[in-house]
Image: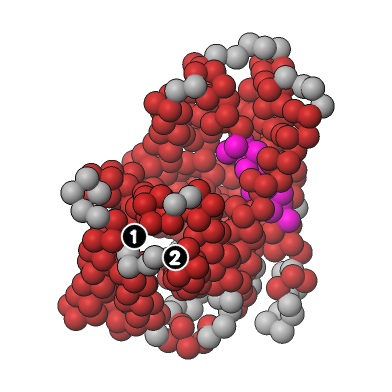
Amino acid sequence: MSTTAESPLLRNSNFRWLLGGGLVSMLGDQFSMLALPWLVLSLTGDSLSLGIAVALMGAPRAVLILLGGTVADRYSPRRVLLLSKYANAVILLALAGLLMLDQVSLALAYAAALALGIASAFGIPAGTAILPQAVPPQSLQNANGLQMGTRQLSLLAGPLLAALVLGAHDGAQKTPMAALAVAFAIDALTFVFSAWTLRQVKLRPLAAAATQGMWRDMAAGLSMVWRDLPLRSCYAYWALVAFFVMGPLHVALPVLASERLHGAAALGLLMGAHGAGTLAGMLASSLGGAWLRRHFGATLLLVDAVVACLLMALGQISTAWQGAALLAVTGLLGGYLQVAIFTWIQRRVAPAMLGRAMALFMGIFLGLAPLSAAATGALLRHLSVGELFCGGGALLLAAAVAAALWTDIPHIAGNPSVSSP
């Protein structure tokens, strides 16, 4: 690659292809994320059926993502990601065609959700393993920030765009199923486009990695994380963080908006403030890069301690603007830290193992999210929402303090990019 340390990242043709194709694909995803629940509710009007469809899409990601990371390491992340995109396009085009033919059923919706979930279990780890092979090592932090910021922007703007398109088709006197078919077809075409852009990317060649069979390769990835003490310590710590934070944000926040702020509009304001803060943090991730590389572990624990205090304060709010301000800062810190964490893992782990390392990292959050949500829902039967936020924040603060006192995390520094397995 011709990009040098002085060249702006956006002059890197590899990154432009990845960023452009990824943006189009992520915007397309919002059409399916809106259309699939609508399809299930149109067929049944039953919230349980909707929950089953969501579970069918989410469960394969949690169960199969480590296998997906192993496959990406064995057969190249780009090849696995391309196949995942083609599979998604075929699934969505088939679903759109059957909807246009009025051949629709709940079983079809369930099958599509399951197939999309399986495809994403392979596509997600492959996608996170590509970037270190596509951009110069010194640009990795900025590339992660822009790529993740683009994803966050799509989460903010994509649903609105999808709703406008679907609403326009409804206004044109099309049947609801035809409008849904259009949404799925649009998403399928964005997968085709992003697959084409991915084929334009030229990755740095890697030394051939020794393979021992699929299951042994998977075990080797787990063993690598276990033997690397800083990596192992961080993964265990992030599991605690995921459990203490994700449930309150996903379950207790709507309850807080309902009980104290009296309206869905308030919940929208809170979620929008958190999303906007996250986007700002991701886009600001290049700030303090050199200092962060020297003090990665200490920064990680300090930010989590501040977030813990913000969560405790969130339990005491009485107006929507107070919650929005707290969540904007929480999102800002979280977005900055997300980019730093991804970059740290990508630099620490050899490319031949990166798919498995990232799959395990994301599997922690995918697996613990439903457990955290269920625990939060159960606790809210016995605690007030204010007590729950205070308790969750206090536990997160205790975890950060314990990690600072009794683990090696505060002494972890950033790593130079690993160029060979």
Which x, y percent locates residue 184?
A: 67, 31
As drawn, the label of residue 245 is 1
User: At label 1, which amino acid type do we have?
Assistant: Val
Which residue lies under the disc numbered 2?
A: 319
Q: Which is nearer the eye, 176 or 206?
A: 176
The answer for how far apart the CA atoms under marks 1 and 2 are is 21 Å
**Vertical side of 20 occupied by 142: above or below:** below
**Vertical side of 383 occupied by 84: above or below:** above
Write the residue at 78% across / 34% down. 168
Which x, y percent locates residue 283?
A: 61, 72
Inspect the magenta stretch and tell me whether residue 35 lies in it.
Answer: no
Write the residue at 60% across / 14% down. 104
Specify which label sits upstream in the sequence, 1 or 2.
Answer: 1
Q: Which is nearer the eye, 396 or 111?
A: 396
Q: Which is nearer the eye, 177 or 324?
A: 324
The magenta segment: 20-34
Q: Nearer the viewer, mark 1 or mark 2?
A: 2
